[in-house]
Image (spheres, grey):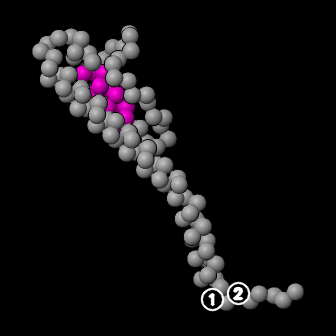
Amino acid sequence: MRRVRPTVFRWILAIAVAAIVSHVATDRLKDRVRTRFEHCAQTADWHARVGAEYRRNAAGAGSMLRVAAWHDAMRRAFEHAAAHPKVAVPRSLPFPPSGWEPPAREALARRR
């Protein structure tokens, strides 16, 4: 069997083939990460808009302010999920589950 000599052209060709294979192998992963980020960012934006609307229309009603606080908490959760790909995407719920209480103001101040 004849031995193949490693010329500069063959090395360049091998590196080009490896680069193409690497790009094809990681393209789906990059697309999935980008789609996940866009989904989380859009959902966070939706919760921000809905929370602002509830807060604007609340007129001091505790139940509406509670729902607005829920949307703020959901917005923060989706922004966190968008920024950290390894964090699980939370379920987007339009209303707080029974028994949910808004976080204390001190806890919110410590997070920032």
Name above or below for residue 108 compared with residue 46. above
Residue 73 within the magenta-colored segment of the rendering: yes
Residue that badge 1 annotates: 8
Q: Picture coordinates of residue 90 (x, y %)? A: 44, 30
At horizontal 44% and vertical 44% (from top left) the residue drawn is 36
Name above or below for residue 1 compared with residue 31. below
Residue 42 within the magenta-colored segment of the rendering: no
At horizontal 42% and vertical 50% (from top left) the residue drawn is 34
Q: Is residue 91 visible?
A: yes
Question: Considering the image in quadrants, where does the N terminus appear?
Answer: bottom right
All told, the count of numbered labels is 2
Left-right relation of 99 to 9: left
Instruction: Give, as a three-letter code, the residue at label 2.
Output: Pro
Residue that badge 2 annotates: 6
- Quarter occupied by residue 16: bottom right
Q: Residues within 10 Å of mark 1 (few under 14, many from 20)?
A: few
Which segment is the magenta one?
A: 68-79
Q: Secondary structure at mark 1?
A: helix
Q: Secondary structure at mark 2?
A: loop
Q: Residues within 10 Å of mark 2 (few under 14, many from 20)?
A: few
Label number found at residue 24: none
- Quarter occupied by residue 10: bottom right
